[in-house]
Image: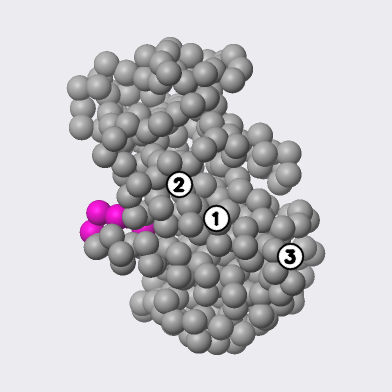
Amino acid sequence: MAIDAATTVAVTGGNGTLGSAVLAHLAEAGYRTVNLSRGSRREETADAYRRVDLLDAGQVYAALAESDADAVVHLGSVPTPTEDPGHVVFESNVVSAYHVLEAAGALGLESATLASSMSALGAGFEEKPVEVDALPVDESHRLSPSNPYGLGKQTVEVVADGFARRESAPGKIASLRFPWVTSDADCRETFVEADRSLDGLRESTHHHTAHNTLFAYVHVDDAVRLVRRCVEADFAGHERFWLSAPDTSVEAESERVVAEEYPAATLRRELEGYEALVDTAKAEELLGWEAKKSWRDLR
């Protein structure tokens, strides 16, 4: 997609931490941006703001139409399954994405980028240990979520598959499987200033979550660059992408982490140093993206 004064990207959930960062990054790159959010405006970057209930199909259609958008980035949903009833979390993820894709197709938008999650793998908020067949995990790995958040994200990807088969749909749809998106402050507090050894983590309350998310994270600066690459990409149909920092969040070499934390998993290739357990090769090949920021750079 060429960047010019007529190129407009609508971002749902632009009031959120990631959404506001995406708006700022796109604006700096020369795009006109519109924040589509439910509450009062909480950022000052977007060129326009539209208040919208993403669970209302008519409001979504009207907001995108009034935005005169060429592309949409859909980040607006309930972010965790811990503070709302399960059916509310699932509905927020799935129905909002359906409405966004349907409106985007009807209005002839060129692209839609959707926030999926590592939780679609069966990771994240699951009470049981994550089921990992092979590492590093790539887009071909099976999905086995059970909680409403993970199920919702898996369903969103299936919905996107269906829309990609329609005549009236965005020409390209990307689902981004986000791990924890961090800032410099997050990295300092959670990684740099804490005991990130395997033994230290095992004695902490954070071990289950870290284990279940494959010790993955991504810096917000890298995340927003990938969102922009999706907006500008020229692939067709629906594609899923893993994203991750280049390394793990643990102070142990990755082959040791695999051997001790995921002994049943097949090692797909030799891992070097602290290399991430999430394979981002597809994003590198199709989108020209790779993560640059590591928490280790802040020590």
Q: Which residues are magenta?
A: 79-83
The residue lying at 20 percent from left, 22 percent from top is 203
Measured along the vertical axis of the image, is residue 22 above or below residue 37?
above
Residue 231 lies in the magenta stretch = no
What is the three-letter code of the residue carrying label 3? Gly
Q: Residues within 10 Å of mark 2 (few under 14, many from 20)?
A: many
Q: Earlier in the sequence, mark 3 or mark 2?
A: 2
Q: Earlier in the sequence, mark 2 or mark 1?
A: 2
State how far apart marks 3 and 2 are (Cα). 24 Å
Residue underneath mark 2: 120
Q: Nearer the viewer, residue 272 or 21?
A: 272
Disc 3, SS = loop
Residue underneath mark 3: 171
Q: Nearer the viewer, mark 1 or mark 3?
A: 1
What is the three-letter code of the residue carrying label 1? Glu
Magenta span: chief secondary structure: loop
Contact, mark 1 vs mark 3 (Cβ under 8 Å): no
Residue underneath mark 1: 157
The residue lying at 73 percent from left, 39 percent from top is 285
Can you say which quadrant of the picture contains the C terminus? top left
Task: Residue 32: tell me if it is visible.
Answer: no
Q: Earlier in the sequence, mark 1 or mark 3?
A: 1
The answer to whether residue 147 is left or right of residue 43 is left
Q: Residues within 10 Å of mark 1 (few under 14, many from 20)?
A: many
State how far apart marks 1 and 3 are (Cα). 16 Å
In which quarter of the view is residue 140 placed? top right
